[in-house]
Amino acid sequence: MPLYEKLLKVDTRIIYVLVLLAMLIPMIKPMGLPIGVSENTRKVYNLIESLPEGSVILVSHDTGPGNAPELNPMLTALARQAFRKNLKIVAMCLFDQANGPQFIQDSIEPVAQEMGKEYGKDWINLGYKMQAQQTLKMMIDDFWKGANNVDWSGKDLSQFPIMANVKSIKKDVAVIFETTVGTPGYADWMTYVAEPTGKPLTGGASLTMYSGVQQYIRSGQLKGFLGGMRGAAEYEKLVGKPGKGSAGMDSQSIGHLIVIGLIIIGNIGYYMQRKAALKK
Amino acid sequence: MSSLYFLAAAAAKAPKPEDLTPKFWQPGMMWDSIFVLLLFLAIGIMIQRARAGLPIPPIRKLAGLDAIDEAIGRATEMGRPIHFSPGMSGFTAVTYAGLAVLSEVAKKAAQYDTRLLVTNRQALVQPVAQEVVKQAYLEAGRPDAYNPDDVRYLSDAQFSYTTAVLGLYQREKPAANILYGYWMAESLILAEAGSQIGAIQIGANTNTFQIHFFIVTMDYVLIGEEMFAAAAYMSKEPVLTGTVVGQDMFKIAIGLLIVFGTIWATVAGSSKGLVDFLLR
Amino acid sequence: MQKELPLIIVFVSGILVMLSKFFNFWRLPELVATLDKWSIVMSTFAMLMGIIELTRLHVNNVRRRRINWYYSIVTLLAIYLYLPVVLIQGPEGPSPKWITTNVSQPIGSAIYAILGFYIVSAAYRSFKARNLEASILLVAAVLLMLGQAPIGEAIWSGFPKISDWILTVPNSAGMRGINIGAYIGIFATSIRVLLGLERSWTGSGS
């Protein structure tokens, strides 16, 4: 087999093993590469930092299990910043009924316990809400009705002191923080809530979606946005406590180098093939 | 240029929106409703021209739609089935476009006696897809060839649907794979798996976050509004073609508005005056 | 009437929802709010239809001993063993939560992780500098990968800046163009469905 054919037809199993090693080795032996902070992440941090004490952040954690490693650390870092500033968090999800509420609980509860914040007083998990568009439209004026009057465990909202001051998005919510991987996602929040009410909308997206939200950041409709695990790592750095976002960065670095290496090998093989064909 | 500057200054000093907007209009929606009426007008004019038998511009060549015949022919020669999916969304315009193409694909599959496998993610779409395929087989004169088990609802959950389709690829080894609708994270998984079994692939996706995965892995891709021209393109009906032309006329008008807004923003230093004027 | 009734329903409900976006008169908002509630109820019934459809498909697979029919038994067991557990304990009950946390979530994450491998094999196969457009795609992809990962920044501090510029300028421009076209296309298709010009979905032909 000529060399160019070997370069063009590397077995996919070898490729997959290389990728697996690229992910695993940095997890066992971290390299600790420094992480710079982008302008978009700074915008998110500064927006939350500018809120007065007692302000309500409405969180919509719209992710599934696939993107949870990218987006859960964002929520954890937000909780840390918000609780440090004595802000309130009202969290819900529109995307994944089975996993979304548990992700909220797993991301916020440990930080709340660490920082002495109480469920029902400083933060609440409203769980999954069906029919995103209709729910959001209702919540603008009547938040409790949109939330079906219950939290994620089915308890009436009247039992929770935090909800006494959250009756409508229009009057009682300071900022909307939305983590998005698809639909329902940031587009629904932007179309049905942020644009009609003028509430600032920020949050984070999976890396595949991050390229698509840039236009909305440039137009000012999104007040900064975090992008994938890199965005989570940057946010953790600003908040001052590295977490799962930062831990994945070394694997991402090696993984990217592997991809670039394979692309170079493929192109070398392609050019050698073209040269051989021209010679014939 | 100076007249634009004075226009901008006048718009900035204009009375507040609530003083001008008639009460029956939703706040900020006056210009939106005018633009929608313009779109109706453009489409209406082209429909009337088509009905009157006047010439209307033809739709340009769309390689992805032309390739459907090639894909069905390849599947027929190889004695392997065709796989079609109308996407992940419920009853949206994208699904209607997908069902229009499904109708044409089913008719041709019936004519060539090639097995057609249709997979659905949405339970609401399932009976409609079954009816569309059944009717197509009836119109092709092959009602006996229709098998309701070949039009399958697999799962509402994103990755459950994806793994079910991956299993179908391995079992049935379709020679042609048509993914026509709204796709999210599963787009790359399905497209790459289809590529690995050697299927000829045609994709269409309005999700701009995922379209690049289709472009990289599929043989033919319809981007953005190309997928909505399918019904008109394949049926060659003048009235449907007229609606596509009307839509393009409106797009040109939007393009001119963008150019005007860019010049305005450059001259006035900011587009705020124009935006405030349009948000009345 | 079988062909006309779906078109009438689509026209009336579509026009009402569209008018409610722009106008505010009579009892239009209340009417549309009622339609919204009905759509929520219909989605719930759709889930029931989905279960019936899945059961029919997999029972047929088992009866006719189609290829890999034993996996259909696994599917049916998964549906009909899980259903009573959720009905008795509720979705937040201990068993459903255990299944969600220890079965559903890891499987979902694993399937999503396949993306990482598939991206690499797709990039290796497709990113060849065959012509100008492919070369631009290749160079942009490499620059973005180097800009996003900390190692790129460690090699040269300019990579993140180039990566940000590619994301915010040419990428945004392309996305905006495609989005504007796609949304106008969606609107035009909706008008065609509303006016009954697009009828393939009714199963009654064009």
Image (cartoon, rainbow, N blue to C red):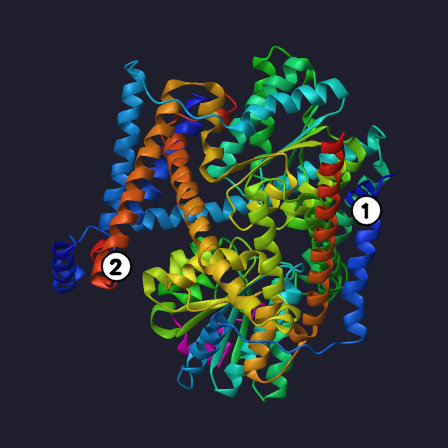
Q: Say above or below: A60 vs B242.
A: below
Side of B23 relative to B223 (left or right): left
Q: Residue at x 28, y 54 (%)?
A: B262
Q: Residues within 10 Å of mark 2 (few under 14, many from 20)?
A: few
Q: Nearer the viewer, residue C149 or A142?
A: C149
Number of the label disc, if any, that sits on residue A207: none
Residues in magenta?
A: A152-167
- Quadrant where the image shows the C terminus of chain A: top right
Q: Quadrant of residue A241?
A: bottom right
Q: Amino acid under label 2?
A: Thr
Image label count? 2
Q: Say above or below: C108 vs B134.
A: below
Q: Find the distance from the CA under tag 1 to the CA under tag 2.
A: 52 Å
Q: Residue at x 24, y 64 (%)?
A: B269
Q: Residue at x 68, y 40 (%)?
A: B154
The residue beneath circle 2 is B266
Q: Nearer the viewer, residue A233 or A61?
A: A233
Q: Say above or below: B271 vs A199.
A: above
Do labels 1 and 2 touch, CB within 8 Å? no
Side of A46 relative to A96 (left or right): left
The residue beneath circle 1 is A10
Q: Position of residue A135 (x, y in %)?
A: 45, 58
The chain that hosts pointer 2 is B
The chain that hosts pointer 1 is A
Q: Position of residue A258 (x, y in %)?
A: 74, 59
